[in-house]
Image (spheres, helix red, strand yellow):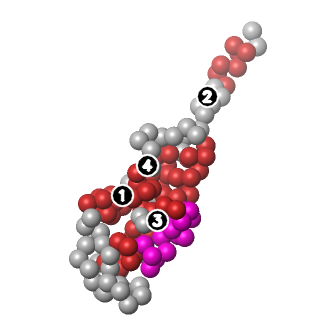
Amino acid sequence: MTSRERSRLLRWQMGWLPGKPIQCTNCNSHRTSRHHLIECLDIVYQLDLPLDILPNPIDHLLNKLPRKPPSNPQTILFWQQTWPKLMVALEQLDKICHPNPNDDIPADPELGQQFVDWLTPPPPFLPSHDPSLDYILHL
């Protein structure tokens, strides 16, 4: 997990994101709050989650995070698909709540990739072929 991703997650968990209410730059009609931003950015749709986890789908997902790499293929697939979307949503929230006209940092194309890599089981070990041992096979 990158330092930016970690920062956004911690600020969300601590209640510092969205932070002090400001005019929402996404819709320009409301002030930023957790409830408004979740609705304004349609987080439930972005994360492809059922509507019954409202009012806070982000906290719902964070509470479901695995503590160790899961072995269930469905769980792995769920997080491989959901985690990068969650990181994009938190990035959008952060940019709305902390607009910076001088912010020329491009969006990270691999948001969430380190966590996805952690989830993915390593490939099975296949010993490399050592030609010097071929004579043993022919004995």
Residue on which disc 4 sits: 65
Circle 4 crowding by C-alpha within 10 Å: few under 14, some 14–19, many from 20:
few
The residue under the point 65% across, 28% down is 129
Label 1, label 3: how far apart the Cα atoms are = 28 Å
Region rendered in magenta: 38-51
- CA gap between label 3 and label 4 equals 18 Å
Separation of marks 1 and 4 at Cα, in angstroms? 17 Å
Please state if 47 lies on the left or on the right of 133 as rendered.
Answer: left
Image marks 2 and 1: residues in contact by CB distance under 8 Å: no
Residue at image coords 51%, 68%? 44
Residue closest to the far left: 20
Q: Amino acid at mark 2?
A: Pro
Coordinates of residue 54 in the picture (x, y in percent): 46, 65
* Quadrant assignment, res 61: bottom left
Picture disc at residue 2: 1
Q: Which residue is mark 3?
A: 54
Sequence-wise, the earlier of marks 3 and 2 is: 3
